[in-house]
Image (cartoon, rainbow, N blue to C red):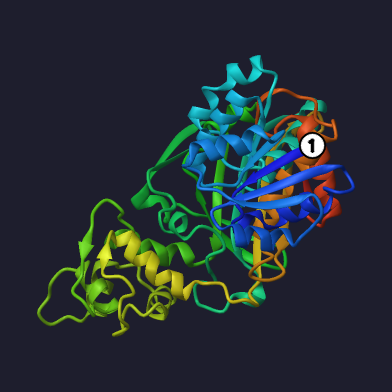
Amino acid sequence: MNHILILGGGKSSTFLIDYLADTCESKNRFLTLADLDAKAAAAKLQNRSNTAAVSLDIQDEPSRKKLISEADVVISMLPAFMHPIVARDCLELGKHFFSASYESDEMKSMKENIEQKGLFFLNECGLDPGIDHMSAMKVIHEAHDKGEKITSFKSFCGGLLSPQSESNPWKYKFTWNPRNVVLAGQGTSRYIEKGDLKFVPYHQLFKRLETVNFPGLGDFDGYPNRDSLSYRKVYGLQEIPTMLRGTLRRAGYCKAWNVFIQLGMTDDSFVMEMPENSTLRQLMNAFLPYHKTLSVEEKLAELIPELDFPTFEKIQWLGFFSDRKLPKTKGSPAQILQAILETDWALEPEDRDMIVMQHQFEIEGVSGKKQILSSLVCLGKDATHTAMAQTVGLPLAIAVDLFLDGKIKLTGLHVPVVREIYLPILSHLETLGIKFVEKEIINPARPSQ
């Protein structure tokens, strides 16, 4: 009997747990779900056969290692910084490891030992990273098989709201970790365009936008992710002149969010303390210059010349020009802003989220040039059964299932960019309604003169 251990039963684990727990009895497997809150974990398992919920503090090394030692495969759905702790235990105890998170440098340092022990470690097998890798590699490998050359690859992904749930001017609510949303883009983003290296510092990031269109859904803003350049090697496109990976928001979001960046309200490097009973208006004013006659609104307009009415409306909707009390008066500006947004951008039980992803390829072949647009739209059912949880959890669950069934026979440290991993996962995702729609635009080569 194969024993599966899932560490972490948070929001993104829902579909992963259901998929694996539903097949435990028929496939002669046992599933243990370990979480700090054992009652919540038990509720997710719903008394299904061959499953058990246990309480675990991940910092409790003896308890953690005992659970890992009893498992055959370990799935870490913990915060990303905890994955190396679990991975080291798996390496020491000879257990296979799976996660949906980025493959860290610490994880890469284990590569040789993982190979020596004949273990299979799979990372980046969720949504982004995950489905983005797999769907992109399918197009890339098909092009290479035909002898075609990929000259441009841009990929965008966003976790947003379905159109019927876009109930505020931002057309946005939290469908993922709020802190990550508030701190998104900090640092310098890097990509390459027509052979020119591009570096975008944080204060310019939300101005450097591309418009991405989805038929039936309209336009979205795409801004560059932190590091697109490293993926040239991952995708086998080292010589490609254009490579960009980006994040999607509804059109207009980035312009309004940039106001907070320009003011310094997303800064996480210092602690501020506002007086008790301070208002959102006073918080905004704290980041504006003093003027004896101008109002907060007038000072903001003077400081941010590109402030238009749609942008003003978004900031006004959050209450920054009102006497609404701050939910938190001490913390970094980013922490205080997050506390405000966690109220206004919270998903209501009936809200439905939406995942949008689009790959844009430019390809040269013997018959001329062409573009391929490969697009995915996935809608959630409600605030619990979200598209985010579905697209993060299902690829990982399918990978574990395939591995235990002996259909993935690889060993070593991997991300899902090889056919043996991505082809069966993508095929199964299609049966679950997670499917890319491809559009090909042919530009025949001009005849020679």
184 shown above or below 173: above
221 shown above or below 364: below
Q: Residue furthest right?
A: 26
Quadrant hosting residue 86:
top right
Quadrant hosting residue 292:
bottom left
Query: What residue lies at 75% left-to-right and 39% top-to-bottom?
Result: 3
Q: Is residue 226 visible?
A: yes
Residue 410 x %, y %: 76, 24
User: For mark 1, does the 10 Å Cα neighbourhood hold few (<14), some (14 to 19), or many (20 or more) residues?
Assistant: few
- In this view, the residue in front, 389 or 207, is 389
- In this view, the residue in front, 94 or 266, is 94
Residue that numbered label 1 is attached to: 2
375 shown above or below 327: above
Query: Which secondary structure lies at badge 1?
Result: strand
Q: Residue furthest left?
A: 292
Query: What residue lies at 86% left-to-right and 49% top-to-bottom?
Result: 25
Quadrant the N terminus occupies: top right
| Count of all numbered marks drawn on residues in the image | 1
Residue 307 x %, y %: 35, 71
Q: Is residue 370 left or right of residue 77?
A: right
Residue 288 x %, y %: 20, 69
Quadrant the C terminus occupies: top right
Q: Residue furthest bottom?
A: 323
Query: What residue lies at 57% left-to-right and 63% top-to-bottom?
Result: 175
Q: Is residue 329 left or right of residue 356?
A: left
Q: In the rendered structure, which amino acid carries the disc numbered 1?
A: Asn
